[in-house]
Image (cartoon, rainbow, N blue to C red):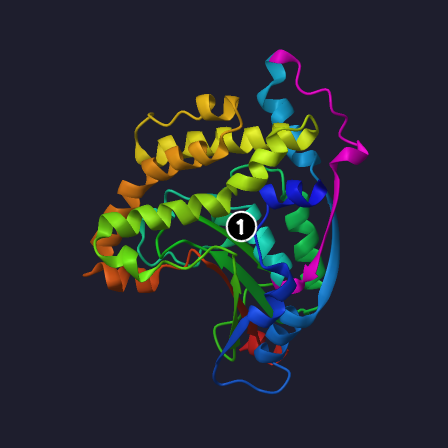
Amino acid sequence: MNVAIDAVVSLLLVSAAVVGLVTIEQSPPATPGAADAVADALATTTAQVDYSLAPGIRELDARDAASGGSEIPLDSPELDRTAHGSLAELLARATTATSGVDLEASADPNASTPRASEVQPLTRTRASFRRGVADAVRTRTGATVRVDATWRPYPGSPVGGAVGVGPTPPRNGVHAATLVVPTGIEPVPASATTDFESLGAVVADRTVAVLVPAGPAKTTLRGNDPSAALVRHRYARLEAVTNEATSEENVSLAEPLATEDTAAANARVTAALAPRIADELRARYDTPTAAAEAVTVSSVRIVVRTWSPASEVR
């Protein structure tokens, strides 16, 4: 059951093949042992991250303080989780699991790689997981390495996630390499590029599928453990930020979630987001085909930057 539960609020990845599917793009110039070597290590080095869902329960307690909060003790073993995978996979999971809505960045068409601090997560459920992943990466990189993992459905999207590890790079002498990790969501098909409306609907559908996978969410909601409450909380936050992002309070998920109909709940959020996404893509690109080429909903981008200590004092 934990596998299904973990999938709800983390990234759906093709975990068995993720290392083979990760691609590395090297930005010259590079030297042996620099950014490309670190990127390769992220793709091939495995780690275990132990974490707790207690931050999510604490957030629920704060929200429901008037009604006495939850009865789940924060030190309950039911809240303990363990994640395994390559460092690149774990970074990708942490990026999407702590994704949210950044309305200010959505006004900037160049805001495709936000700093981690700029993105407000939907919930705090995976805060412990994010810290654990960052610590695991930090211990295997070094003092002159910066790693930025970013998920954006498209450049300037109001939805996204970012995890940053390491110090700010200097202005000069920096080498870079990029990892592209699949989210497990299918890329935009060619049939969706006939017009911006069709493209917006497809991108919205895939965006919501990353935020809350309908199948695992349905399974979890049928249970009585803490994860069911956390999934309902995630849907409540998704409802709230969708209404905020669309400037219309017309998205209500109470009815479908009453019967664990997560497919219908996701469809309602998709329908609300699709027109805004279509309008934003239309404003930025000349054709639906050009817009589709810029869509990155199906992947997490991890940029590695390395430099020598001497570069910091120039």
Q: Position of residue 146 (x, y in %)?
A: 58, 66
Given the image, on which type of amino acid does mark 1 rest? Thr
Relative depth, front residue between 288 and 123? 288
Q: Position of residue 102 (x, y in %)?
A: 42, 44
Tell me which residue sits at (68%, 45%) in the image.
3
Q: Position of residue 244 (x, y in %)?
A: 36, 32
Q: Is residue 288 visible?
A: yes
Q: Quadrant of residue 312?
A: bottom right
Q: Is residue 94 left or right of residue 71?
A: left
Image quarter of the N terminus? top right
Secondary structure state at the residue bearing disc 1: helix
Does residue 83 belong to the magenta stretch? yes
Q: Which residues are magenta?
A: 67-88
Q: Is residue 91 left or right of residue 139?
A: left
Tell me which residue sits at (67%, 28%) in the image.
223
Q: Residues within 10 Å of mark 1 (few under 14, many from 20)?
A: many
Q: Is residue 305 left or right of residue 70?
A: left
Q: Position of residue 84 (x, y in %)?
A: 72, 56
Relative depth, front residue between 123 and 111? 123
Report which residue position mark 1 lands on.
96
Establish if 91 lies above or below 141. above
